[in-house]
Amino acid sequence: MSVNQYWIERWEESQIGFHLPETHPGLLRWFSDSQVLEQSKVFVPLCGKSLDMIWLLQQGCQVIGVEVSQLAVDAFMQEQTLSPKKMLLPDFSLWRVDKLQIYCGDFFRLSANALSGVSDVYDRAALVALDKPLRQQYIEHLLTIIPENCNIFLITVDYDPSEMSGPPFAVPDTEVHEYFSSDFIINKLSEENVLAAHQHFADKGLSSLIERIYRLSPISDHDDHSC
Ligand SMILES: C[S@@+](CC[C@H](N)C(=O)[O-])C[C@H]1O[C@@H](n2cnc3c(N)ncnc32)[C@H](O)[C@@H]1O
């Protein structure tokens, strides 16, 4: 089974334990403090039916999501009582309503054109949804399609991989540095054991579940790091 088919079937079987019934607390705590202005255009890769998109829209942001499961996009629109216009593109169906656009299709087919003007990426449960080979491809593709001056707000999880197999996959701090340190200033905003709030992971055998939140700011040509 392809990875995309795996996710499509998870939605069909309602195996969506990753979906939060409320806005992620990290978004509320950190994103509003950062540069989210009414002019912000936020890309939400692997968006599912995340309520974080609603919160971002409520802040006045434009939001662009990409999600492979049509069922997820449909559920999002219905649950939020939105009536989107749908357009068929070669690789996607594009669902648009007010300041929201969701590309339904494969993230790896998304091109830079779709993300023109994007100022921020919001990645919660996207990078960690993928195994390591796919994570590397994900980062490579992401960095190809986002505009040069784009910030990334990233939420990862980390645990002892001998205790559980993903998804979500454990992404250690060192791996985040491996992916981003040459292009971004990496600011770790928080690091917290959140296992108590995720009993189902304790039931699966985890002894700790570390959630880290990062703000990644692009290193511009003007940042002089020489002596
Ligand atoms: C762990 S869920 C996270 C969803 C959302 N970010 C959230 O916080 O609830 C990962 C999502 O990515 C979607 N997905 C996986 N691979 C994808 C791909 N290649 N292109 C687009 N969406 C994908 C899945 O269908 C699933 O909804």
Image (cartoon, helix red, strand yellow):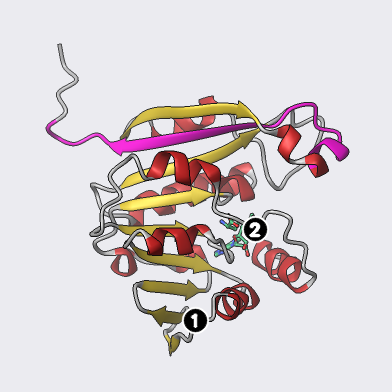
Q: Quadrant of residue 97?
A: bottom left
Structural distance between the alpha carbons of marks 2 and 1: 18 Å
* Left or right: where 223 falls relative to 126: left
Q: Position of residue 194 (x, y in %)?
A: 67, 33
Residue at 44% x, 51% y is 122
In which quadrant is the N terminus drawn?
A: bottom right
Does residue 203 show up magenta in the picture?
yes
Q: Name the residue under label 1.
A: 82
Label 2 SS: loop
Q: Residues within 10 Å of mark 2 (few under 14, many from 20)?
A: few
* Residue segment shown in magenta: 201-222
Q: Which residue lies furthest to the left in this view?
A: 222
Looking at numbered disc 2 in the image, what kind of residue is underneath it?
A: Pro
Q: Position of residue 13 (x, y in %)?
A: 80, 70
Q: Is mark 2 within 8 Å of ligand 1?
A: no
Q: Which mark, by number, is residue 21?
A: 2
Q: Which mark, by number, is residue 141?
A: none
